Amino acid sequence: MRRVLLILLSLFPLLGVSQIEGDEAQEVRDFTATVINAQTEYPLESVHVVNLNQVKGTITNQDGKFTIPAAVNDTLYFSYLGFKTQKVRVTNDMFRFGDTEIALTELAYALEEVVVTPYQLTGYLEIDVKNLPVNNAYQYSISGLNTSYEAGNKSPSAVTKVLGAILNPADLLRNLFGKKPRQMRKLRQIKEDDNIRDLLASKFDRETLTELLQLEKVDIEDILNNCNYSKSFIKTANDLQILDAISSCYEEYKVLNRTQ
């Protein structure tokens, strides 16, 4: 029995050291690296770098260098116009040895032909008005403005649809928001980081949003559809406008959910 106690006591210091090392591994520190062009090995300036775990963003300087808060196992997301986006996992060795280089690969761009079809006007007002397409957009969010949102009138049933969607326990909106509260809590953090906002304002592919919120593109569309945003808005808005729309919808969901 005494021998067993001695063995256990001898293991305690090792367990303590192991715990300390584990804690240090998760410590958030300043991480510095350089982003280069994979083809030319030249540094890339103004690359957007986002820590998806800490929800922090920055950009590279003229030497391609950046510094961002990060912990081991955090994922860094790199985005630069004309280059393939890339995700990099931060490791212990990156902190230990420094001089880390992240290489981005150029994309090949092909301009698609744009066909412009003019309206065929007859010159008769009554006929031309009937033939012109109708803007069915009900909402349109322009980030940075405190006023409302899109040309055209709101549907008379817009409020009813939102209320019905949120108050229905089986509705997709509740399922998405209810099952992913951690991802939705990131909304406020994302909106407070100017570098991330600048990146989202220049993006239209929803790729960065899906990485930040850990949602699929179809989930984002379903959220906005259930909040009665128009198809034209969902297709044409930039990622920052989409983020603002999701945030607004989520705030409505939380308020109405508390009243149940």
Image (tube, rainbow, N blue to C red):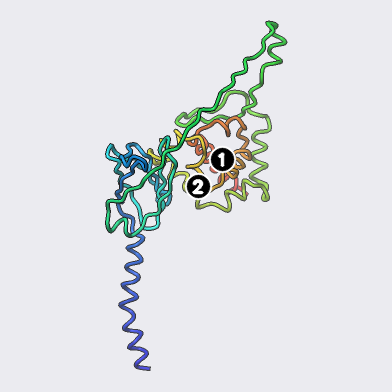
| Residue 17: percent from left, percent from top | 31, 72
Q: Dividing the image into 4 quarters, which one contains the N terminus?
A: bottom left
| Residue 250: percent from left, percent from top | 55, 43
Q: Which residue is mark 1?
A: 249
Q: Give, as a three-letter code, the residue at label 1.
A: Cys
Q: Quadrant of residue 135?
A: top right
Instruction: Using the image as rendered, state which of residue 194 and residue 249 is in the foreground.
Output: 194
Q: Give, as a three-letter code, the residue at label 2.
A: Leu
Q: Residues within 10 Å of mark 2 (few under 14, many from 20)?
A: some
Which residue is at a point 51% across and 49% down the rendered structure image? 214
Instruction: Using the image as rendered, state which of residue 75 and residue 239 is in the foreground.
Output: 75
Q: Which residue is mark 2?
A: 213
Which residue is at a point 67% across and 10% down the rendered structure image? 121
Instruction: Using the image as rendered, state which of residue 187 and residue 238 is in the foreground.
Output: 238
Mark 2 or mark 1: which comes first in sequence?
Answer: 2
Q: Residues within 10 Å of mark 1 (few under 14, many from 20)?
A: many
Q: Quadrant of residue 19?
A: bottom left
Q: Secondary structure at mark 2?
A: helix
Cα–Cα gap, marks 2 and 1:
15 Å
Q: Secondary structure at mark 1?
A: helix
Q: Is residue 221 left or right of residue 243?
A: right
Q: Residue furthest top?
A: 123
Which residue is at a point 29% across and 43% down the rendered structure image? 65
